[in-house]
Every structure is written in C-alpha cells, then in structure tokens.
Amino acid sequence: MFEVVKNTELGTVWLPVAPSVTLTVGQLVYRAASDPVNLTYFPAASGGGTAKPVGVVVATNLRKPLYSSTYNANYITGVASRADQLALEKQGAQGSMFGVGDPAPLVQVKLIGPQTEIKGTLSAAPKPFQPSAVGTDGDTLTNSGLTLTDYFTTVYCRSGANQGIYRQMSTYDASDVLTFPLYWPYTTTTSDYFVAVNTTIGNTRINVDTDGRNLNVASSVASNYYSVVVEEINLEEAGKEYIIFRFV
C-alpha cells in the first residue's frame, strides 16, 4: 500500500468514487483523461506511462467502516443510482461541497504533487537467489531465470561479506550474467543470497500493480513504466521491503 511521508502542504480533498469501483485506504487514485469525472484506482503503466495520480486514499465516508482482511485496510465501493446512494450509511458533511444530506460515496484523498514523497510497499517480496557463479573481482554474478531490466535493476546482498550493500546492475545478458559497473567491494560466493528489484535510486523507472495498491518491481520496466525519482530503496527485511519515491 502507499502513504504520503512528506508533502508540501497540499492538504486533502473528498472525492466521489466511480460507480462499481472499490477503493481502499492506501491506494493510489486518479482521474483518467478519457473519463475525468470518475475517480478510480491508478493503473499499471502501459508503455511510458504519462498518467499522474491525484493522491492516496486516507479515509472513506462510511459511518460503519468496511474492512478488507486481504488488504488490511478500510474500503468503499462506488454506486450510481438514487436507491443505492440512499442506502449508504455515511458520516456527516465532508468538506464544503458534500453536506449532511448528500449520500454520495466518497474517499478522502491526500493530494500529491512533484515534491510529494510517497512510501510504497511491494506487491510481492523479491525472491532471494544464490549465484551459480561469481566474478573474482566482484563485477559479475550469474543466475538464470531472473526478470531484470538493463540499467534499471538494483541488487541487494542479504547474506555473506557484502550483506547490507546495494549495487545497480548495468546488464543481464543471454548467458545469465549480471554485470555491475560498481563492483561488490568484498568477496562474493555462490552461497551468498541476493534479491533484485526493477528500479534504481535517483531518476529512474517504476511500475505499480494493476489496481494501484502496491509497487510492481518484479516485472521488467524496459517497456512499461512511470518516470519517477526514487529517494530510498529498502530491501533489508523480507516482507517489509519498501521504496520512497516521487512522481515527476
């Protein structure tokens, strides 16, 4: 899920949820250029994504919150008809536009801009791997079956002499060799464990999962990605990995 960790005092806004769309707290949301009326979840990039999220959902207006054990967060589903709106049990007024008598299903959105820092969790913990071969100088690792992106992959050492150290990969070739322009500083062995994600620090690429709830760093960002600035990658603990980034 996502949370705003640093903002430029953009504040929050209450917005109606698109009919039949379910939004959860912690989800990135936006309004598509083709349908600027309805608020929905921020989609995975197709090609070089140009969409920009409005913000992150931080609350719903239901008087009796609905909780998703799948996402560990409250949620709300949009409706359209008069009867369905009137059937909702909502809280009091939300903002200046949605008064006590308005039964619209709403989410409160923490607005984000180019300077907003967002913390995102990963849709799946990266799978640790052990290299089948290592470069004697620390410039290469060999492992088959990985999904990596030339120049946009970060590798983290989970065990061995280089534990706690990150390196950006330059290429992953047809011989399954990962090459690093900045070598691993200490001896690497085939018993060391590493994990890899498809993003890097600084100006880079990243993608989200299909419904904007987490970052998808397992898939290649060679073709499908958003341009972002990544300020921190934390892969220290399995299942608790996160990335802090900004949309640009």
Image: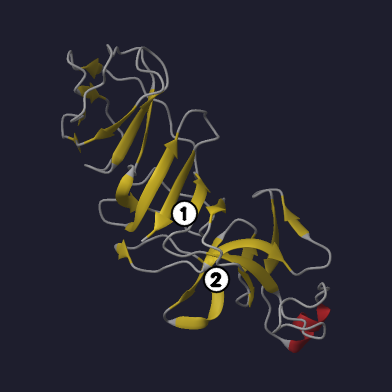
Residue labelled with disc 2: 40
* Residue positioned 51% across, 58% down in the render: 212
One can see residue 147 in this view: no
Q: What residue is pinned by disc 1?
A: 209
Q: Residue at x 82, y 79 (%)?
A: 87
In percent of width and height, residue 72 lies at: 68, 48
Q: Could you say whether the residue bearing mark 1 is in a helix, strand or loop?
A: loop
Q: Residue lying at the far bottom in this picture: please name it.
A: 82
Residue 132 occupies which quadrant of the picture? top left
Quarter holding residue 115: bottom left
Q: Nearer the viewer, residue 81 or 194?
A: 194
The residue tagged with tag 2: helix, strand or loop? Answer: strand
State the image coordinates of residue 111 (x, y, percent, origin top left).
55, 66
User: Mark 2 or mark 1, which has the lower sequence index?
Assistant: 2
| In this rendering, position of residue 69 left or right of residue 193 | right
Q: What residue type is labelled 1?
A: Asp
